[in-house]
Amino acid sequence: MELKSLLDQPNKLPTIPKVAQELIISFSSEDVSVNEIAQQLSADPALSAKLLRLANSAYFHLSRTIGTVDDALRMLGFVMVRNLVLGNSMAAAFRNTKGMDLHQFWRYNLYTACAARWLAGRDGINADLVFTVGLMHGIGQLHMHAAAPAQMVPLDRQLTVLDAGRAGLEKQVFGFHFGDVAAELASIWKFPKPIIQALRDVPEPMAAKEFSEVSAWVHLGAWRARTEVLHMDEEQILASYPTEVGKRLGLAADWAPAHAAQFPGQTIATMPPLAELTEGLEAMLE
């Protein structure tokens, strides 16, 4: 299987709603019309209802009820609304993918996005961009299973799609990994280059030609999500920690709950439970 042939199948490429396409364009546009986006969102009753449900979820801790799309844009900000709509659109685009536990997969991606955002927010970089990359970083897996299901079966028998070694196995067998596929999909959808490159480098941030903090934060968020979703025991958690990535970011390991007891003098707060970090956002992926 070649990367080009995997993507050169128009009938198997996932489609996303027009409003999501407009939101993708907004990444690179300084003149995005928030009013126009609000009108497009309002014209989609199902999407509007889900957005309002998300806006009123426990995740945002708002003191009043949000009743309209305009209110959501004002209260949450355009960037967060864009992330919510994109996340929902990606989940819908791959809803019929076979051969994967989609509930587990999207929970892992949501955990990754929220964990990475929490970490990056303490480093002063664009945490919303990190959230976007975290939520999207696994879409290459979905497309590989949708476009070439037979070729994925033997790999799935060796390692699950969430295993830390999965990218290496794919590269050994195919010459590319799911990060490359995610990046190519993002390119087709016309995401900006920084997001495309970040998606490509998430599986192996230390091997990138140019180190990306965004990719590295998402890589760490993915590790934290994996420990939860795969129900790792303490020994597995400690052994699998991406130490070199953490060092490159200047991050002590005590941010993770399993490490906190190992380090008596914590340098940053321990990350809250992932269920708490993501509370209410699961509706985005339903």
Image (tube, helix red, strand yellow):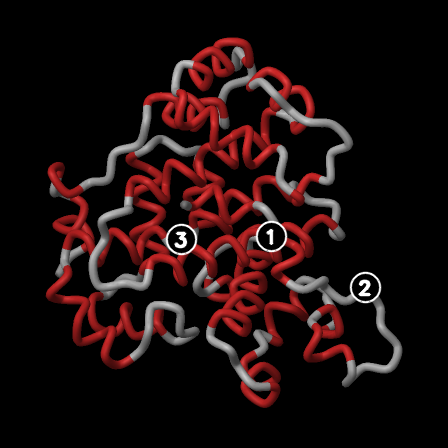
Which of the 4 image quadrants contains residue 244?
bottom right
Residue 275 is situated, as x and y percent measured from the top left of the image, at 61, 60
Residue at 40%, 62% in the rendered image:
104
Q: Amino acid at mark 2?
A: Ala
Mark 3 in CB contact with mark 2 (< 8 angstroms):
no
Please tell me whether residue 140 is drawn above or below residue 90 in the rendered image. Answer: below
Find residue 117 and name its label: none
Quarter placement of the N terminus: bottom left
Tag 3: Cα neighbours inside 10 Å, few (<14), some, or many (≥20)?
A: many
Q: Is residue 169 left or right of residue 201?
A: left
Q: Residue furthest bottom?
A: 235
Residue located 42% across and 55% down the image? 106
Q: Which mark is residue 278?
A: 1
Whether residue 82 is situated above or below residue 159 in the rendered picture = above
Which residue position holds label 3? 200
**Of 239 and 278, which appears nearest the observer?**
278
What type is the residue that disc 1 sits on? Thr
